[in-house]
Amino acid sequence: MKVVWVDEIFGLGYNHLPADVFKEFNAWRPKRKPQRKCLGPNQIWHHGIMAYNPAFIQWEYDVKKALACGDLTKGYWTSDLMLEATREFGDLFNFLYREEGCKNSEGVGVNHQPIINMDWSSNHAAKADDCLAARNFRRSWGFRYYEATGELKLSPRGDEEDGSCVICAGDLGSLETPKTNTNESALADGGRQYFVFRIGDQPPHFAKDKTSLTEDDYVGQDKGLEQILWERGYDVTTMTMKGKKKGTKKKKKSKTKKVVDETKQWVVGDLVIVVILGAVDDSVGHPELYRVVKIPDGHKDMNSTDSIKVERMKLNFYDGTRDYYCNDVKEKRFFGADQLTSVEKFNDEDELNYSVKFGALDRLRKRNKKDPYIVVVDFNLEEYWSLKNGDGEEEGEGEGDTPPLIDDDGEESEDDEDDEEEEVDQQEMEEQEAGDGVVHDSLLSVFNHSPSVLNSKSLMQKLVEGEHFNGMLLMSAKFHPECAGVGVEYCFGRCKWYYKQHHIHSTKGLREGSARCFHKDVVTIHHVRRFARKSRDYMRAYRAGSLGLLQTENNVKIARSHRSAFDTDYTFVSAPDGMKEDPVTYGVDIFVALNLPAVVEMEEEEEGEVEEDDEEEEEEEESDEEDDSDEESEEESEEESEEESDESESEESEEESEED
């Protein structure tokens, strides 16, 4: 994999930059990561940098490292590595085009502003984990946690330094925006909105007991989509997460809140049930069986929010008879104490609800390494669950306790008894979309289509526009490689063409051949400038209103001749041809300094072959002309001989007539 920067001064991968300049740059540049190292000229290791030439980085997938640790993602090129590579190229740009290396005629340093063009790859357009995206919000307010580890998730932040975002008119709803902070006015066009509660904010508007809440209860916690859109002037009471379903609505049974004896606490070995909300449509999933393996210090109440570590119990074929619930040591998660529902060992008739087939529920390790599991339980989860919830009885007769529903972030759902949970299908949601693509009664859709979310900056944009670069990032048009950058796709095309002509079918040949393709004799500075001019021709044609590739091709040809130098300056273009264009050379080649493979002199051979072919064709033409001339001379001689014979015959006939 190659990361290559190109401009029209130093060419593709800055292969025209002298080796002496690279030497000065590497002595000056900052070393950010001491653990990194790379080879430079004369096989000398340079520490703290990713590449000696940051404009041309070669990255290989580390198979040995991946197999050694079992993680096959090791060695892949990621957005973090792309940011690191861009930061190092920024050092080179600052060295060449800023005060350090760029002086005017008076010797005063000049600061240039970079305008960087990239394509829409996933690593270039990646956003931060705490960016403004629907995945970082839930409906209600409060902290969010990771399912597997129970760690606290980052609170979402805007693009401003203080974590806010600037609101524009397109972000605001039709209602009057409320005043939510005692020190600030209500949201308006040009105002700033924060996504966590701050000091001075009023209690969460949709909290059930907001009158009794103090600032310590909510300051620093995430606001949630309901609070955010309510602050923007939307009537969120008529909205759901995915939008209301058209047609018939299926109302689910009302749920009774979980009643727990506050004097009881969880202990290691308890069997518990957790119900997870569907990740796609918020539908109720199947109950899952776990066992408690760790409790925090000071835990005394099952109704608290203490983080309890549990281990999954899965159905597996055991003892050659049938499926039993067996522990899975690889799947451990954290839940709040009030999110668990206990499995009673005895039912109302003093019969066992479950039995331990092997091991013990409170055992944490295998007694024998050959044992496949730590504990095996004989339990009918579906039957127990149906009896627990009173399924199959008349409506209103079921009195079983229903455990709280857990969303995909491991948080308890705050649905009331009278709330209607509506099943929403993605296809039906798309059918509800208006002409602007927004489902107006969907919290997710309205938030995702707001300008503050659509215009949120990527990590690359923040880096380029930050203090390190102080530049501008332009993203290429999707599906149009002919307009990418300064003709970089044409440069890559020439590299691939050269590689196909000279590739060697081996790993070493791949490594050396792919590096050789970027040599300055393969993609010269004249190639780079010609390709850049070609890309600009296409961009001008598209800006002029061309639709489709065929029309664009025609417009490019018209634009090429519309203001032709042949018409404006005939004397200049009609001057006699000069000598062959000399290659641009700034100094010692960096490829030679780094001992990279030399370029095969193929073009000269091809030119020689072409000259030989031309000479052969000329000789054939001359021989053909000689043959034609010989044939013509023979025909002329035959005609002359025939004429002479005719004349002799006529003379003889005249003589005979005279004699007669």
Image (cartoon, rainbow, N blue to C red):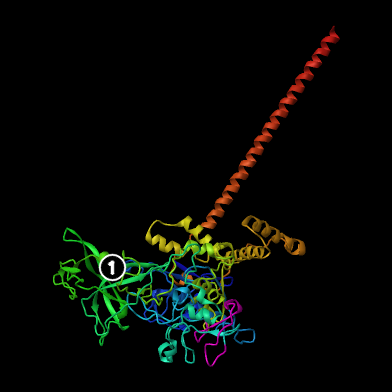
* Mark 1, secondary structure of its residue: helix
**Which of the 4 image quarters holds residue 214?**
bottom left
Q: Position of residue 261 (x, y in %)?
A: 26, 82
**Which of the 4 image quarters holds residue 470?**
bottom right
Tag count: 1
Give the camera-side residue of 378 and 642. 378
Q: Residues within 10 Å of mark 1 (few under 14, many from 20)?
A: some
Q: Is residue 41 visible?
A: yes
Q: Position of residue 568 (x, y in %)?
A: 77, 64
Q: Which residues are magenta?
A: 159-185
Which residue is depicted at the point 63% across and 45% down? 618
> Vertical placement of 423 versus 190: above or below?
above
354 within the magenta span: no
Which residue is depicted at the point 41% across and 91% down? 216
Which residue is depicted at the point 48% across and 61% down? 427
Question: What secondary structure prevails in the magenta region?
Answer: loop
Give the camera-side residue of 630 and 286. 286
